[in-house]
Image (cartoon, rainbow, N blue to C red):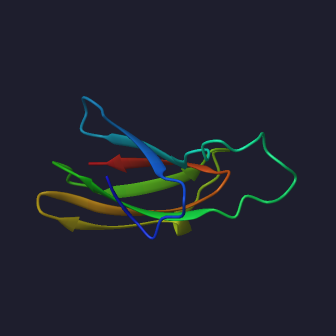
């Protein structure tokens, strides 16, 4: 995982390749270390994460918020070097799930 345009907190990404060739990725911003419990202030952290997914002949890439709502505006992708390059735009307090179908 390569992170670009990151805030003070680092993004976390977990990727799973399924037996049928589908990939499922989860991404979110880690909670800042040493910070007290959440306050009523909005979490304005931002990060853009570039992920290289190897061996993926992606036909579709579908992105969802943690509530299950479609979030296509949060992801862009291109085919590259035998896989795909996926860019996710994360905001504080949210998690994204991305499904890559072969």
Residue placed farthest to the top in the image?
19
Looking at this view, is 26 or 101 the one in front? 26
Task: Determine whether 85 is above or below 30 in the image.
Answer: below
Pinpoint residue 51: horizontal percent, then vertical percent.
Answer: 32, 56
Taking the spot 20% from the left edge, 54% from the top edge, the residue there is 57
Taking the spot 84% from the left edge, 58% from the top edge, the residue there is 41
Count the marks: how many?
Answer: 0
Pinpoint residue 98: horizontal percent, then vertical percent.
Answer: 45, 49
Looking at this view, is 1 or 34 the one in front? 34
Looking at this view, is 91 or 59 the one in front? 91
Taking the spot 27% from the left edge, 63% from the top edge, the residue there is 85
Task: Determine whether 20 is above or below 102 in the image.
Answer: above
Residue placed farthest to the front in the image?
34
Pinpoint residue 99: horizontal percent, then vertical percent.
Answer: 41, 47
Q: Is residue 92 left or right of residue 52?
A: right
Residue placed farthest to the right in the image?
40
Taking the spot 46% from the left edge, 54% from the top edge, the residue there is 62
Q: Is residue 73 left or right of residue 15?
A: right
Task: Determine whether 13 is above or below 5 in the image.
Answer: above
Q: Is residue 7 left or right of residue 82?
A: right
Q: Is residue 1 left or right of residue 91?
A: left
Pinpoint residue 89: horizontal percent, then vertical percent.
Answer: 51, 64
């Amino acid at each position: 995982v390569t992170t670009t345009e990151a805030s003070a907190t680092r993004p976390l990404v977990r990727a799973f390749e399924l037996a049928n060739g589908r990939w499922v990725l989860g991404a979110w911003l880690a909670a800042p270390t040493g910070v007290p419990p959440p306050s009523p202030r909005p979490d304005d952290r931002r990060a853009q994460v570039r992920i290289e997914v190897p061996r993926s002949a992606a036909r579709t890439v579908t992105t969802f918020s943690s509530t299950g709502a479609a979030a296509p505006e949060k992801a862009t992708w291109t085919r590259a070097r035998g896989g795909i390059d996926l860019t996710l735009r994360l905001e504080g307090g949210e998690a994204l799930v991305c499904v890559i179908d072969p």
